[in-house]
């Protein structure tokens, strides 16, 4: 019996790709670029790339009322609100810690789903939620956990992103995608998100002038935006090729690669408490994520 290594290799590539976006975000904010300006250009770059993919597939941007409502919701819950918080937190926290915190997405998604009546109670998943919270406690509790004790104040800010990602997933689970596939949804959300974030960036003084100089932070933003769009397209392909249950395992790799890339690119080093938090998060993710094929596919 031959072993098909293609999907496994694709899973590794996606995990490495999504994982590297966290240290790239750390670099993007290293010279003082403000969050909303970064979010705007991230959405613009993503929209251009996804437009090319949609065009090649023979599609177009659907502009019905249901689709526009979906685009706006995904733009706010999936990019503008969480990424604004992430960029702000990334300026103060190690990239590896950010990668560990983002693993809280399924831990937030589960209680939200229970509150909305979209999931069933499970002891194992409650235990997984508790392990995730234990991981957060290891980050904020012991004095030796973070390089600087003042960083503890920014952990709640970093938790905003996984909360909104969990909310986004439940929104899609409850209201659907208005007849669109994930690439079309992300394309529309990028377009409408850019339209929303532009006046916000200007109004809050977060505007980033792309002609004002192009160094490592700007290159990191462009590379991160391109990687995200391409990896997302690959993720959609993998769901169709190997199934949603298999593709969902990329979440473990994103966290592991995120920590590894931070060590390699940013020369970060971590205390035993942070490694313990990583272990608790990965175990918590394993228990919280649904095992049923239909549940994951939704």
Image: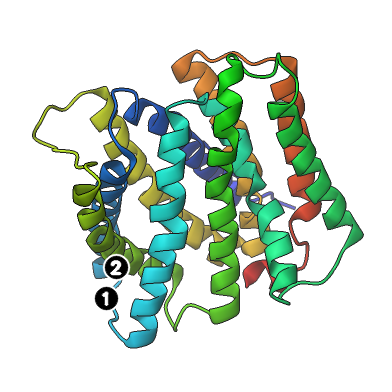
Quadrant in which residue 88 is drawn: top left
Q: What residue is disc 1 on? A: 61
x, y percent for residue 274: 69, 23
Give whichever of 53, 46 is nearer the camera: 46
Residue nearer the viewer, 139 or 264: 139
Q: Count of labels shown? A: 2
Residue 283 seen in the current view: no
Marked residue nearer the N-terminal end (2 or 1): 2
Mark 2 and mark 1: span between their CA atoms? 8 Å
Residue displayed at 45% across by 43% down: 85
Please give left or right for residue 252 compared with residue 35 in the image: right
Residue 285 position (above or below residue 279): below
User: Residue 252: image x %, image y %?
Assistant: 66, 42
Residue 292 point in image, percent of width and height: 77, 68
Near mark 2 (Cα within 10 A), the count class, few <14, some 14-19 or many ≥20, is some
Q: Are marks 2 and 1 in contact (CB under 8 Å)?
A: yes
Q: Is residue 138 left or right of residue 192?
A: right
**Outermost residue to the right:** 123
Q: Is residue 209 left or right of residue 296?
A: left
Q: Residue at x 10, y 30 (%)?
A: 212
Instruction: Tell me the crowding category of disc 1: few under 14, some 14 to 19, or many 20 or more residues within 10 angstroms, Cα based.
Output: some
Which corner quadrant holds the C terminus? Answer: bottom right
Return the residue at label 2: 54
Vertical side of 155 occupied by 93: above or below: above
Residue found at x 26% / y 76%: 60
Farthest residue toward the left?
211
- SS category of the residue bearing label 2: helix
């Amino acid at each position: 019996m031959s072993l098909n290594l293609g999907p496994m290799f694709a899973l590794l590539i996606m995990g490495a790709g999504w994982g590297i976006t966290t240290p790239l975000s750390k670099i993007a904010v290293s010279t003082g670029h403000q969050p909303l300006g970064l979010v705007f250009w991230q959405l613009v770059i993503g929209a251009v790339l996804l437009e090319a993919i949609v065009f090649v597939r023979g599609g177009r941007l659907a502009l019905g009322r249901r689709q526009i409502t979906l685009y706006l919701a995904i733009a706010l819950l999936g990019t503008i609100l969480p990424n604004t918080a992430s960029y702000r937190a990334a300026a103060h926290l190690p990239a590896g810690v950010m990668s560990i915190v983002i693993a809280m997405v399924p831990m937030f998604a589960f209680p939200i789903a229970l509150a909305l009546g979209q999931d069933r109670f499970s002891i194992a998943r409650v235990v997984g939620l508790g392990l995730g919270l234990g991981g957060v406690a290891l980050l904020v509790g012991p004095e030796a956990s973070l390089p600087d004790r003042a960083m503890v104040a920014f952990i709640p800010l970093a938790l905003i992103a996984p909360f909104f990602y969990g909310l986004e997933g439940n929104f899609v689970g409850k209201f659907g995608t208005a007849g669109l596939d994930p690439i079309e949804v992300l394309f529309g959300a990028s377009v409408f998100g850019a339209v929303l974030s532009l006046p916000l960036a200007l109004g809050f003084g977060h505007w980033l002038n792309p002609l004002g100089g192009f160094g490592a932070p700007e290159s990191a933003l462009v590379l991160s935006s391109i990687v995200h769009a391409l990896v997302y397209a690959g993720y959609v392909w993998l769901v169709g090729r190997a199934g949603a249950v298999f593709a969902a395992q990329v979440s473990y790799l994103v966290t592991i690669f995120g920590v590894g890339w931070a060590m390699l690119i940013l020369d970060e080093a971590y205390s035993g408490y942070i490694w313990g938090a990583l272990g608790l998060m990965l175990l918590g993710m394993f228990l919280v994520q649904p095992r049923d094929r239909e549940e994951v596919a939704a």
